[in-house]
Structure formats: structure tokens, C-alpha cells
Amino acid sequence: MIEKLKTVIDRLQAHIDSIPQEFLKYPEGELNRKFAPEKWSKKEILGHLIDSAVNNHMRFIKAQYLPSPVLIDSYAQNDWVKIQNYNEIETSELIKLWKVFNVHIINIMNNTPEENLNIELKAEDPFENTDTLFLLMKDYVDHMDHHLNKIFN
Ligand code: NI
């Protein structure tokens, strides 16, 4: 299990090392552009990844002290993005926030005892593959891959 978590951490670290420079290669007009009112811009996608970090930060901690199985409740993702108006946040500040959260999440992963990776969780969304804390951590990075592929397609 430790071996597998190391792979997840390495994948996340690789994103932290590369994404800030990659993101800044785009001109502001392209980062802000919305192809439809309901579609997220690149900055809004990065904002959504910050929301994912915030919500999963709490899940990763709560799973380790609340009675098992902790409920992995969903959050209204579109409302989170809309309310925070990510397109108006300065790009360099947005990237800093994304990075600092993910550096911290790596710290949490590194401090998770091996036996805690098997803690069982219960997802509100039955299609989520988050039956254990390890799977939730892996899913966090899988979800990030999915959205980064859309930003850098
Ligand atoms: Ni998403």
C-alpha cells in the first residue's frame, strides 16, 4: 500500500513542478475565455481544482478521526466556481493558491500512517470509486489529471 501511495504522491508532485509554468504560457485572454456561459474557462478549471483541494483536504483529515465509514459528501461544484469568480482573480495569485494547497496535500499524504490508508469511506455519489482513504487519495489525483488534460489539450 505504501508503494502505491508513493506513486500517487509522485504524480501530484510532478504536476506541482510543471503546471505553474505551463499555465502561464497562455495569454490572459485565453485563460479567461469561456466557450459558453456554462463552460468553465481555464482559470475556472484551475479554480475548480482548488475547490477540490479544499474539500479533499477536509476529507483526508476527517477520515482519520471520525467513526468509520465517514461520508464523502458531494459539493455543488458549479456554484463554488461561480460564487468565487475565478476569472477575476489575478492569474499568478490563483496559481500560487493551487500550488500551496497541493504542497500541503502532499504533506498530509506523507503523514498518513499506512494502516489508515485502509480506512473505509462511504460515498454519497455511488459512482465514486472512493471506498478507502487510499482510493480517495488516488481519486483526487485522477480527477486532477482529468481536468489538466482539458486545460492543456
Ligand atoms: Ni471536476
Image: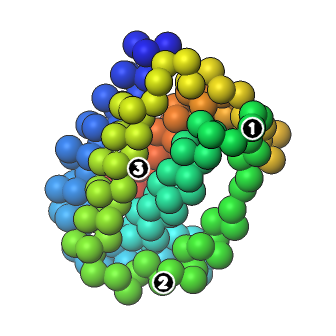
Task: Residue 153: give x, y in percent of width and height.
Answer: 38, 50
Task: Residue 146: give x, y in percent of width and height.
Answer: 50, 44
| Viewer-closest of 137 and 67 | 67
Q: Residue at x 65, y 26 (%)?
A: 119
Q: Residue at x 35, y 40 (%)?
A: 106
Count neighbours of disc 3 (C-alpha within 10 A) and say few if under 14, some if 14 to 19, many if 20 or more: some
Which residue in the protein does label 2 denote? Answer: 85
Determine which quarter of the picture holds residue 15: top left
Task: Residue 103: give x, y in percent of width and height.
Answer: 30, 48
Which residue in the protein does label 1 denote? Answer: 67
What amino acid type should be assigned to the residue bearing mark 1? Answer: Pro
Residue 148 marker: 3
| Viewer-closest of 151 and 111 | 111
Instruction: Determine contact: label 1, label 3, CB under 8 Å.
Output: no
Determine which quarter of the picture holds residue 3: top left
Instruction: Give how far apart the Cα atoms at labels 2 and 1 are.
Output: 36 Å
What amino acid type should be assigned to the residue bearing mark 3? Answer: Leu
